[in-house]
Image (cartoon, grey):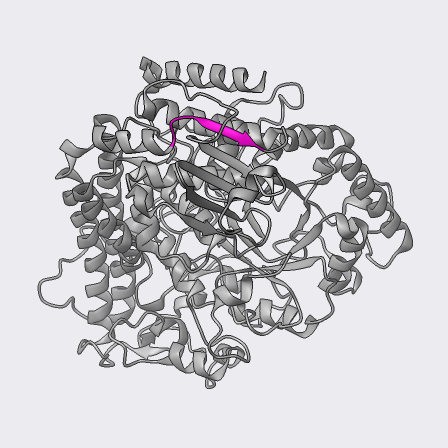
Amino acid sequence: MRGAATILAFVLALLLATGPSRAEDGYDLWLRYRPLEPAYAKEVRQIAPALSVDAPPGPTIDAATAELSRALGIWLGHPLALVPDAREALQLCRRDRPCAAALPTLRGTGPPGSFGIDRVGSRTVISAADDIGLLYGSFALLRHIQQQAPLNALPQADAPRVAIRMLDHWDNLDGSVERGYAGRSIFQWWRLPGYVDPRLTDYARANASVGINAVAVNNVNAPATFLTPRFIAKTRALADTLRPYGIRVFLSARFSAPRDLGGLTTADPLDPEVQRWWQTKADEIYAAIPDFGGFLVKANSEGQPGPQDYGRSHADGANMLARAVGDRGIVIWRAFVYDPDPAVERTMQAYNAFQPLDGQFDSNVVVQVKNGPLDFQPREPVSPLFGAMPKTQLGLELQITKEYLGFSTHLAYLAPLFEEALDTGGLGRDERATLADIVAGGPTSLIAGIANIGSDRNWSGSHFDQANWYAFGRLAWDPTRSSDAIAREWVAQSFAPDPVLIDAVVPMMLTSRQTVVDYMTPLGLAHLMGSDHHYGPAPWVDDLERPDWNPVYYHRADADGIGFDRTAEGSNALGQYPAGLAKAYAEEGDPALPFLLWFHRKRWDDRLATGRTVWDELVVRYDRGVAGVDAMALQWNGLRSRFDARRHGEVAALLAVQQHEARWWRDASIAYFQSLSRRPLPPGHAAPPYPLEWYRTQRFPEAPGI
């Protein structure tokens, strides 16, 4: 019965794949199972002529067989046969079954999800100790074939280095998505639980294909409504849909829920009535969703309630919730906080709030720390908390949605940003330890990414933003992977395994993030974006409620110079880092100067390692960014014949928008900083076409994601 259902599902998928509705609109993401080159397809038929399954029946095994049938049926040219005899077949082998006796070694052992792929005589065997490992191994085999990689290099073993690989959705009750640039929420709360959009199964497939195994389904700024029985039932429907793909559901919990929902007069974490309320609520959720992952909490940040409202610490609040959850799940406590006293330098606030609490958090608490000490800027140094809390499980928070990097309009491949953070060394007592070393390993190790997934047909708002979702999953599984290798995988699967195409597109992707840095925040500048919507340049803003919400707070430009002195002579934010890393960040002899104005205040006429003055270098970087976008657009247009017309045209249109907006960033920023520096532009660099006041008066009430 299960085999018949799988074949029927494949036939339906094949009909859809060949019908007019299957235009190249980006819906298939990187799971585009298109016909292979004939010679390669012949080799695939030899290693996977049919499918044999030696594993207990279950929904995850069904998901694996359905995926293999979907892809191999297209590649073989006929439905994939399910056979009981594995002598000449692709086999799924659970290691507690008789099939394991024939394996030469038990490869791919390790944490949940580990798998091995072996050639055993005329069989190709995907083996794992658990069902989810067989699903991950199936996706790994399909990924290898999609790239038309040599099949004699097939044997492999893989295991996740990070236990919890999580997407955080900032989706709201009304279907809007905070910092979302790809349409409405895919969760459709209004229709749940009675109707679950079939698209959520494709969402689960995409996540499982890159190893993502956890999802927080609601905004960290969520109301307590998500904890009501009505919404627990809705969340249960989501959990039931995602579970076969190894994905556990988390909820963002509002700390004041005992007051908001329970009728209590307090949410003090040390109050026994509050503790009982959370224990009862956790029991209610686990009764409905036995594999519920736990709570994600934003507390005492940007107006959200928290334990400090009652004179308690973040550890008091996190531990109270962790004890309610118990050994059934975890509590993820975000370290993105504001000090009540804005006189404390902004980038030092999270360290000051959390580092003294090291060792005070329960074992099922993960403190989730953003990659940098500010707020997902195009470039930041790593947060000094990493390495400073050895007795606390720290999780890494990355932003996949491009809140500060051009929304879904600008092409910016974020894997180099992620890799730059993960490869940062000199953290903690062991100077050889990298950020990847700190966040990997252990049953509660965690890397989370703020998703940019919405109801747009292509999921992410633009085709190249899909690469950031893909890259996040691959790096969360193994933080040592390279941006280049991940980009090559993604291009081959999403477009075509064409070496000429790959060699042309991948370098463009790898330089795209630096290009954005150059035309938005060169030389270590940060937070120059417009207020609230964070769209477009606004380095002149100085009228917001808190000083550290204003761009002028961060660049500190005036007639004398520019930059934030975070050395010992200034705020001494450098003092929060280990000595070796602090020295590297303070380096001024590097021509790249990635953090110059982040850590130093410089006079406009100071001479830099590049041989230019600060003012001239700033202008050169802005123009380099504009030239980088022009080069991407030119490169893309030259590849027209190698792409399907629809996706090529959509990318080309967005690159034209990016060309316009890169110039806007360049012109507005130069106009503003020149009004302070009073220096002429270096020879060969054009003046902005409009006066500064024109740029200052631009308004964008329609900007998405607020």
Q: Residue furthest right?
A: 272
Q: Is residue 169 visible?
A: no
Q: Which residue is found at the position 43% from the left and 63% from the top?
A: 421
Query: Looking at this view, is 258 or 605 the one in front?
Result: 258
Query: Looking at this view, is 130 or 222 the one in front?
Result: 130
Q: Is residue 293 visible?
A: yes
Report the side of 39 relative to 559 (left or right): left
Q: Residue furthest left?
A: 684
In what quadrant of the picture does the N terminus appear? top right
- For residue 129, above or below residue 564: above
Q: Which residue is found at the position 70% from the left and 58% from the top?
A: 365
- For residue 488, above or below residue 441: above
Q: Position of residue 266 (x, y in %)?
A: 84, 51
Q: Please provide the residue range marked out in magenta.
A: 48-54
Query: Looking at this view, is 86 or 407 the one in front?
Result: 86
Query: Looking at this view, is 686 or 514 the one in front?
Result: 514
Report the side of 663 relative to 551 (left or right): left
In which quarter of the view is residue 679 placed?
A: bottom left
Q: Position of residue 165 (x, y in %)?
A: 54, 49
Question: How many numbered marks, from 0 up?
Answer: 0
- For residue 58, above or below residue 7: below
Q: Which residue is found at the position 75% from the left and 47% from the top?
A: 328
Q: Which residue is found at the position 53% from the left and 15% from the top?
A: 4
Magenta-span inclusion, residue 419: no
Q: Position of residue 216 (x, y in %)?
A: 60, 42
Q: Position of residue 581 (x, y in %)?
A: 44, 78
In which quarter of the view is residue 688 placed?
A: bottom left
